Amino acid sequence: AATAAEALLQEALGAPAGSVRVMNDMRLAYRSAFLPGEGVLVHTGTGAIAVHLTRDLRLLRAGGHGPWIDGAGGGFWIGARALRTVLREADRSGRTATGPLADAIHAAVGASDPSEVRAWAERGGTRAVSDLVPAVRHAAFAGDPAADAIVKRAGSELARLADALLQRVGPLPVGLAGGASGLGPPLRRALVAELPPGTAVRMAERTPVEAAATLAERAVAERAAT
């Protein structure tokens, strides 16, 4: 599939033979934080995955099994736990849930009635539920204990993924990237607390798109040098 995509892009761009390269998105995400062999990247999107690109460019991974199997720490997992918390509170009290987390979720959904919230999630699917991460972040910063607990548990789950690879490749720095990484310092503190003592943790400073541009620029320079 990658070879076919390369050929189509090459033709569409009118690019020279061999000048277009298509690669796994996690390879690019990794290069946004580390050079090959340099660290372990934990990436959160709808799901969650940890990856390590070896010096000989083999991609090792832990997680990334999809949100329906085990996306713990990813956007869908975070959003679903927030929805569950709010709807269970409504079940318990017999009234619309209130508080920072409930208010943030209801604002994001555009409804507060449990049946409407449920219908919204069913219509929107994994993407819509994943998009609730900013609402959870807002509630956590507002001091909501349930939202804070979700963020801390997400950090713990992401640390579990990172540690699974660290056990295989040895002690290395850990990078954090992706949408759910926007949960901020509370997530990072929870992640650090669960990693082996002394593990350096940093946020990815570039996007995968920037990493792709850097790789392309390097390839052009290498081709010119030869």
Image: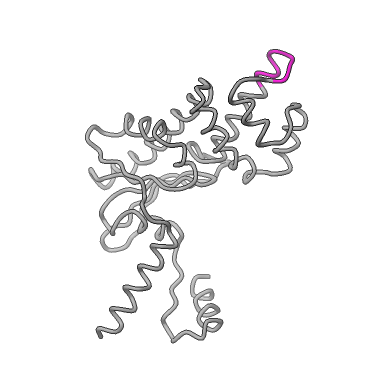
Residue at x 51%, y 33% (from the top left corner): 137
Looking at the image, residue 63 sits to the left or right of residue 36; the answer is: right
Where is 83 relative to 39, above or below?
above
Where is residue 126 drawn, in percent x and y?
63, 44
Where is residue 190 drawn, in percent x and y?
38, 30
- Dividing the picture into quadrants, the one containing residue 79 is top right
Q: Residue furthest top?
A: 93
Residue at x 44%, y 66% (from the top left corner): 23
Looking at the image, residue 131 sits to the left or right of residue 63; the answer is: right
Q: Nearer the viewer, residue 161 or 191?
A: 191
Q: Is residue 52 magenta?
A: no
Residue at x 59%, y 42% (from the top left corner): 131
Magenta part mainly helix, strand or loop? helix
Q: Nearer the viewer, residue 18 or 105?
A: 105
Looking at the image, residue 75 sits to the left or right of residue 184; the answer is: right
Q: Quadrant of the C terminus?
A: bottom left
- Dividing the picture into quadrants, the one containing residue 225 is bottom left
Where is residue 152 drawn, in percent x and y?
44, 28
User: What is the span of residues highlighted in magenta in the rendered image?
Assistant: 88-96
Q: Nearer the viewer, residue 105 or 28?
A: 105
Looking at the image, residue 77 sits to the left or right of residue 36; the answer is: right
The total number of labels drawn is 0
Where is 205 relative to 151, above or below?
below
Q: Residue furthest front?
A: 142
